[in-house]
Image (cartoon, coloured by chain):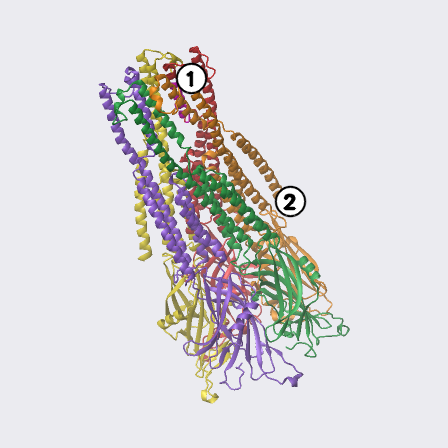
Chain colours: A orange, B red, C yellow, D purple, E green
Amino acid sequence: MIRPVKNWTTTTQVNLEMVLYGILGVDEKSQTVTTHIWVTKHWTNEFLRWNQSDFCGIDEVSVPKAKLWIPEIAIQQDASDDSSIHEDPWVIVHPDGSMFTFLRQRLTFTCRFNLYKFPFDSQRCNITFISMDSSVSSLVLGSAINDSVLMVTSTQFMITQGEWGLKDIELVSGNITNGWRYHSTLSYTVTLDRKPFLYVINFIIPLVYLLFLDLASFSISVDSGEKFGFKVTVLLSISVLLLILKDILPSTEVDLPVIANLCVAVFTLVWLSVLESMLVSFLLNLDPCCDKESKKIYMKKDSKVHKEAEEENGQVKPEQSCFPLGKLGAVELLRLILEEVKAARQEAGSQKKHRCYRRVATIIDNLFFVGYILTFVAFVMYICIGWINL
Amino acid sequence: MIRPVKNWTTTTQVNLEMVLYGILGVDEKSQTVTTHIWVTKHWTNEFLRWNQSDFCGIDEVSVPKAKLWIPEIAIQQDASDDSSIHEDPWVIVHPDGSMFTFLRQRLTFTCRFNLYKFPFDSQRCNITFISMDSSVSSLVLGSAINDSVLMVTSTQFMITQGEWGLKDIELVSGNITNGWRYHSTLSYTVTLDRKPFLYVINFIIPLVYLLFLDLASFSISVDSGEKFGFKVTVLLSISVLLLILKDILPSTEVDLPVIANLCVAVFTLVWLSVLESMLVSFLLNLDPCCDKESKKIYMKKDSKVHKEAEEENGQVKPEQSCFPLGKLGAVELLRLILEEVKAARQEAGSQKKHRCYRRVATIIDNLFFVGYILTFVAFVMYICIGWINL
Amino acid sequence: MIRPVKNWTTTTQVNLEMVLYGILGVDEKSQTVTTHIWVTKHWTNEFLRWNQSDFCGIDEVSVPKAKLWIPEIAIQQDASDDSSIHEDPWVIVHPDGSMFTFLRQRLTFTCRFNLYKFPFDSQRCNITFISMDSSVSSLVLGSAINDSVLMVTSTQFMITQGEWGLKDIELVSGNITNGWRYHSTLSYTVTLDRKPFLYVINFIIPLVYLLFLDLASFSISVDSGEKFGFKVTVLLSISVLLLILKDILPSTEVDLPVIANLCVAVFTLVWLSVLESMLVSFLLNLDPCCDKESKKIYMKKDSKVHKEAEEENGQVKPEQSCFPLGKLGAVELLRLILEEVKAARQEAGSQKKHRCYRRVATIIDNLFFVGYILTFVAFVMYICIGWINL
Amino acid sequence: MIRPVKNWTTTTQVNLEMVLYGILGVDEKSQTVTTHIWVTKHWTNEFLRWNQSDFCGIDEVSVPKAKLWIPEIAIQQDASDDSSIHEDPWVIVHPDGSMFTFLRQRLTFTCRFNLYKFPFDSQRCNITFISMDSSVSSLVLGSAINDSVLMVTSTQFMITQGEWGLKDIELVSGNITNGWRYHSTLSYTVTLDRKPFLYVINFIIPLVYLLFLDLASFSISVDSGEKFGFKVTVLLSISVLLLILKDILPSTEVDLPVIANLCVAVFTLVWLSVLESMLVSFLLNLDPCCDKESKKIYMKKDSKVHKEAEEENGQVKPEQSCFPLGKLGAVELLRLILEEVKAARQEAGSQKKHRCYRRVATIIDNLFFVGYILTFVAFVMYICIGWINL
Amino acid sequence: MIRPVKNWTTTTQVNLEMVLYGILGVDEKSQTVTTHIWVTKHWTNEFLRWNQSDFCGIDEVSVPKAKLWIPEIAIQQDASDDSSIHEDPWVIVHPDGSMFTFLRQRLTFTCRFNLYKFPFDSQRCNITFISMDSSVSSLVLGSAINDSVLMVTSTQFMITQGEWGLKDIELVSGNITNGWRYHSTLSYTVTLDRKPFLYVINFIIPLVYLLFLDLASFSISVDSGEKFGFKVTVLLSISVLLLILKDILPSTEVDLPVIANLCVAVFTLVWLSVLESMLVSFLLNLDPCCDKESKKIYMKKDSKVHKEAEEENGQVKPEQSCFPLGKLGAVELLRLILEEVKAARQEAGSQKKHRCYRRVATIIDNLFFVGYILTFVAFVMYICIGWINL
């Protein structure tokens, strides 16, 4: 079938009107958007005209598509199945030769996503209608309506939005070349706004809450026997959240998303704080040993005292402990009892004193805590700048 | 093929009858409903009539579709694949020119969901049949049966319901304009009731149970060494439930679902209670220090007492501990033993007394507990109002 | 094409033979079954007959389908894609006019499931062949073989069964009306038996094991500091199992499955036992306080004794503790030491005596344990009756 | 179109050549295998012959399929979509009447799996080509190449193998009857070897490691307060692994897989060991009570001793504890102090002695440990025999 | 339709131009890549030529495909559905007989992956265009552009890349034989670079972090009662990561991926360290027993001392404990009190001394720690070599 123009140099103008009925889904992994659209094509057939009055006033006739030339328009980004298109098999013809045809499509199109600000991002996607087989000199694509009418229509007809809201539609006509000739194009630039609600609830809030918990866990004393368990459970929870991140973010490198930075930073902070609390606990556990050493010295001194005391009494006791007790007077026995009781009390009390490493541990703990908070504040500022200012 | 009317101004009435065979699935993310429907189309061909008696009483003839004009009816919300439609290739023709044709379709249609009351919600979805290529002046859609018969038929034929029950079907005829002409429409407004059973069992009951557990964990004493582990495990469980929420709810912002509020509120309450129990534990751990300080004062007093006692005895002991013991009488030794035993008992006892921060901690704990319960009650009321009254 | 009968009132008998090649899957959520079937259609064309001897004994000719009338048979419950049908494009014609045609289909059909006895359920599904465009007066569906042969054939040809075993196939001919005329139907009632093996291993055994663990955890003493952690981990495990339940069961309300009851009951039992052990622990923790009070009374008495003792000695000591010690004799000192040692031992021992609430706690614990076991036994009986008797 | 033979009794020989390009996936649940195959069909048309020299030496002509008789060959186990077949629309004709046609298909076919030795299993699947509409007397299927060439070709062309390796292809010609006539078949019996690497790493190694951990946890003493937590965490981990089992194994009952036995056995062993350690802990906790009873006896004896001692002293003290102290001499006081100190020491020491149930617990523990190890060894042998010998 | 050449021996040159629009996904399990491509086919029809000046300068005519011979080109690795191809139904014809046709396809093709260096791998995949029905003597495939232009074009048009970046495209013409004749081929060798970002964040970093945590947990003392819980939680976390590994890696054996080695090694290291810490804990728990034994010896000695002391006093006391106390003098009583106090202090102190197995445990611990670190370092070097050098 030949393009229906009387002079072959006449350019046929095809007007398109796309109405967005719904945004069914966005797949960040494969970088595709699935929508539900209705498209109206309108052009003029110079040979199919009649005088309405000659034919009882008929102002509209339906003709099967197969009988007429139909402009072949494709969408450049279209990656959908063929069976997702449902075309009306009829063309509507008007007395002035203007022809209309409709199609409905569940359109899956590719779109380059910028996920830097995820989940507060908005994506600009192009749906570029292009004449596959006619050059720009024979077929030009246009639109009957302008941007604002388009936006109003789409907002009015849009049934489903789900996770994404339609922010803006722009219309740009242009040409594209495949190297040896030019094709006319009509681009709908659709701007979509993500509704971040669920990601905030499911990912950001738990992450920040867990970071706060870790921060607060500095107040748990190491002796309570719950600190490590608590911290490692927090770390496990963050691991689980990392898995969710994997589900929602593709593995792209350009424009590393702020949320990934957030996640890694929180994980690292919590991990460092586990290591630090282990170091502190290790230092505190060193103390009993050093204490023992100091005790040994003490005990040497003690035994020296004994010896002196013994020498004072002028008695040599090869087995000081038990045997010669029988020969002691009540006063010496009382003195020995006093010494024993004192020693027992000192031993019980020593548990809490003389900790030479405890000061080091406390200093490390406090320094780390300050560093932690500073990093935390700096990071929150970075995140906010990333999400808001850009 | 031309519309089979003798006078082109005659409007063709097409009667549709849709029977809902099953609701196969509802996808909240893409906001689509998948159903299984059978549609009967019925109209009159003014040229295809015969006198039954002239043709041996034949009252029904099957004619291939390709030979006749068939009204092209589409569903506006239809987002299904083309291959999901299975059309009967024949038209049944009766002597009076009335024609019948059937089709079965696995219909996936878009529907604007309102998830505010999820999972106790019911959704109203429109299935709008529309003549794609004929204006309202040439083709009018109608229904042979009324709402109540429709409801009875659908209830009777409905094979599968799964998660959704059919509550109501309404039938509305109308017109729709695409700007330059009117199309006749026939809308089936289907009201679906979700069966909330599984969500209650899997999400709401565990969530509420966990909240109660957290509430009950106020009764665990901080000293038991199980409180933090218990609470953080409860928090982890709620995180897991949050993930389920993500699976079942789309990220929409309009009409924030009550269940999401419930989830965030429970998470926040439990999180706050973990923080609060940490604060309490921290305050209780402060006590030994303050206690130590008070002990220092006490010990100073004690040593002063010693000195007084020593002065009383008029003896100067530069090394009070061991050396001069030998020179003491039994009475002084007994006095010293008594002092030691007393001091030891006081030290052991001091663990439980003089806690200056404990009162603060207890007050905070009780205040928080009361606030927790009040918030809890207020929230339960809000949830119930949200789920019931709206 | 016209139905190939000489007299239009003659009814054409179409014999169907369906062989079930495999049960590929059952989807409880959308209530559909996917099978792999081969269907043979057989009928008689009264015009296409020849005398074998006239044509060199040709006893079989293949004719393209497009050239002949083919009965249009649909499956009422069929919700599969059009592309899942693979029809032989030829019809085999025999000299007596009998015609055969084959088709293979990956059939997805809807079926009303009854999941009450899940996973020990068996489902009865209908595959109803129906003539879409011919009434019962012109086309009657039948089967060349009877039920038992059918069962034998299907068992023999069945390649894959997977989770479901074919228990029985029944064959029922009948009529169905769509309001204004009758259609002939042929129903295959397929009874499928679920093989419960995996669900028992993955769900029921772990659930029952966990319930037993919880029951056994009554033997852990509250003082061990492991009871709550143990119980809350068991609860967490049951939550995880609840999630599996969500994956395998749809959210239907009619005939609440026994397994859902089991799951909720186990969850509730374990939850109650956590709460109960908290109550017991709380009561036991109350004891030290009440003990302290009783001690205060004791100490008052003690100090009264002191006073009496002091009065006995006729001495007034405004600061009884330290100052006047110097003036005491050895006997008084020994008496004071004895008092101190006694008091210390009583304090240490008091930890284990005088627990006024412990008896209450023990009674609650035992009562709850008995109630727990009774409920458990009653529930096991209910479950068994549910799974076996129905 | 008629089969292109001069005499209708001539049998047409159709030679098939299937090349396996890839094994895309195996679905154990639905028991299907997805492959990527290329099939060449070759037969002879007795009417389409020419003398090459008469036609400028043309040795090959392409003819559209629609113009010629094409043998209709189906695959019996084929459960794929129609759209997965991509047929060359041309037939290549040679001067001797031999005709070639190609098709490529993403073939999903059903196959009866035997998962007994999973994941060390190998599966034998049949791909049976069958002539749908011609009986064996008119169309016979054959193969131009033999088994070994076939294996070489497939190994050479096989692009992707993924989880499965091609072990063997066999070729069998045969007949099959559908009751009233015979069809010629050509079966490719494909033997696939699973590569078990990932399942060993992800399932078997962790499971065995966890069993060893549980075995090793017998060395943890009950008093450490970590035993139950450790064991229940191991049990939880095994539950998680059970879930993986559910993902990889279908719920079939015939030939219960060895790996399922392994899983259930490990779960049960660990569960029993948790119960056993609870029993042991319970018995150990009984001791203090029995100890208390023995202490009561002791204390009675003690008080009897007191009484005797008192009687010895010939004094009646109705309130032995405090009041009459003032009247005692130093020796009696010392004796009382000695008694107090002794009693205190005995009380502290009694914690560790007199445990009447401990022996029972230790015996149970050791017996169970031996039984555990024996079961473990027996089971490992059973598993190995199951995986290797069969 | 016949190939449009005047002399049948003339070879038709078909130039292909493939532009890669997007890489939609890579499936490691089924070893397929899904892309979005546009293909231009260009060849010359020797019969369809006209003199532009004779026909008003017409330089381009669109002709329906069905009217002309179209070369049938397939992609050897293509495993996509038929409906994924969207062909322009028109051919563009130029006055010199050169013809152009376009098609867009969502191409899923098989590709042999080498996952050894996952996730730092890059894959080379072939897209081989092949003439299905024409031998190399009649149809030769070529490309109008060379490699570098191709790379520039693809980089410019590539809309979506997602996880994979296009590194290189090479173009190779060749022949392939199916045994009895040669076909012309045109291979696009596409080199894809994986962007490892997400796998590093989600898998490698957590894994290495967890290994460090386990390494650091050597510093936790066994007495703290947190060591096993900590380590088993780390093990559980690694199990969870193993599950992720299962999701991202197929079960292939050739070229066992480095990351799988990493995972198994980390799991085994952590598992060994749990076992080792159990051994150490077991040895330390042996001590109290051996201590008890040594104490028994001590106590025997003690009682011997008693006896000696008693003998010294020349008194025989059959019931040494209580009865004869009344008859002792103050000095003997004091001596007994001293003995009691000493024994009590020794018992309390013995808890910390005489540990005969502790040294063995410490040696094992240190040796294991050194071995652990050495293995760790060696393994890190192996991993780095695996990922970098190959």
Q: Badges 2 and 1: C-beta atoms under 8 Å apart?
A: no
Q: Is residue E346 above or below residue A141?
A: above
Residue E334, given in percent of the width and then of the height, sits at 33, 20
Question: Which residue is the site of mark 2?
Answer: A390
In percent of width and height, residue A257 lies at 60, 47
| Quadrant housing the N terminus of chain D | bottom right
Instruction: Give the percent coordinates (x, y) of residue C346.
Output: 33, 25
Mark 2 and mark 1 lie on one chain; the one further toward the N terminus is: 1
Q: Amino acid at mark 2?
A: Leu
Chain identity of mark 2: A
Quadrant position of residue E229 = top left
Q: How many residues crowd around disc 1 within 10 Å: few (fewer than 14), some, or many (20 or more)?
A: few
- Residue E159 visible (yes or no): no
Residue range corresponding to the magenta coloring? B336-351
Q: Which residue is mark 1?
A: A312
Location of residue A45 in the rendering, given as x and y in whole percent from the top left corner: 67, 68
